[in-house]
Image: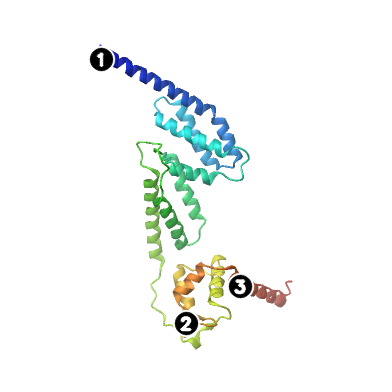
Amino acid sequence: MKTHTKTSLQKLVLEALDIQYRKATQQLQAQLDAMVAGMMRCQTDKTLQALLVSKMARLVQQESTSYQQVGYLQNLQQWILEQCEGSCTGDMTGSLYRQLIRTNFNASSFIAYCKARIEEELAGIAGVESKYIALCKHERDFGHLIYKKKSLKFEPGLADVKTVMLRYVRTELAYLKKIHESIVVKMPPVAAPLQADKIAFSFSVDALAYFFKLLVNAGVVVAEPKSQLFRFVAKVFTTPGTADGGIAEHSFTNKYNQTVQATAKIVRAALVRMLRLVDKEFDLA
């Protein structure tokens, strides 16, 4: 009698779960068109759109999908619909991308999307050193990643987003480090010239640093690695107020990385004077 009662109870529970599952998938399907329209209106990246829509559509058609996955996509769909309410002020791709990472959407298609996004970013960056710095930022972001409370990963059998992406970023960092080491030419140390033999720059060290930063960013000077350029400039140039020891390399490096508007205006004025000289000499005005 007890066995019969237990079996009947289990059957009722399974039937209730089945009804709940079917109801959830029906709701997911019913709001799919509204979600797509909202993402299009909010200018969401089309690749990311297709990835999510495909995942939801396939999940609705499968019978073996877990209720955990259905629940995950329901919560995601609701979040997207809430973001798309009213008029969008701009591209929603960034916020959606971060939401998927913070809620541990570890589907293999999304992991591939994350990697492609980083690769596209690196392709637009010139120089191994700059690429390395960009990857270090990603390593820091993924390393400090804290998932939202009560967030269960989408694919229970796969590694979480943080683990996979940290492994990927660190592999890329190791690869770039090897490239960097292979192209750095080991040069003998250059003796610092005497103060009288140095090239005098009429503006401050800040202006000198920003001037060279413009040359590098404009592609006029190719500095790889930049540390070699910093060392050269600090040894060869002198500026008003520079002590007998010359420009300190670490000071020049700091000023190169941190420019204030006042310095930019000084350099701009000098560049404008140069342009006027070119126009006058070759009658280009």
Residue 78, horizontal then vertical, whole percent:
51, 34
Location of residue 5 in the rendering, given as x and y in whole percent from the top left corner: 29, 14
Where residue 9 appears, x then y in whole percent?
33, 17
Nearer to us in this view, 46 or 77: 77
Position of 269 relative to 138 (above/below): below
Q: Is mark 2 on a helix, strand or loop?
A: loop
Assign the C terminus to one quadrant of the image.
bottom right
Q: Which residue is drawn at 38% across and 50% down?
A: 166
Does residue 55 appear in this view? Answer: no
- What's the residue at 45%, 75% (across, down)? 249
Please name the residue that numbered disc 2 is placed on.
Answer: 246
The reply to whether callout 3 and callout 2 are in contact (CB within 8 Å) is no
- Give left or right: position of 34 versus 170: right
Question: Depth-wise, is mark 2 or mark 1 nearer the camera?
Answer: 1
Which amino acid lies under the numbered mark 1 shown in the image of this protein? Thr
Marking on residue 150: none
User: Which mark lies nearer to you, 1 or 3?
Assistant: 1
Q: In the rendered image, which quarter contains the N terminus?
A: top left
The total of numbered circles placed on residues is 3
**Disc 3 from disc 2: Cα separation:** 21 Å
Residue that sits furthest to the top in the current view: 1
Q: In the figure, residue 180 lies in which quadrant? A: bottom left
Q: List the residue tagged with mark 1.
A: 3
Answer yes or no: is residue 187 visible: yes
Q: Is residue 67 above or below residue 275?
A: above
- Amino acid type of the residue tagged 3 in the rendering: Val
Q: Do the residues labelled 1 and 3 touch (CB within 8 Å)?
A: no
Q: Name the residue under label 3.
A: 267
Q: Nearer the viewer, residue 104 or 185?
A: 104
15 or 187, nearer to the observer: 15
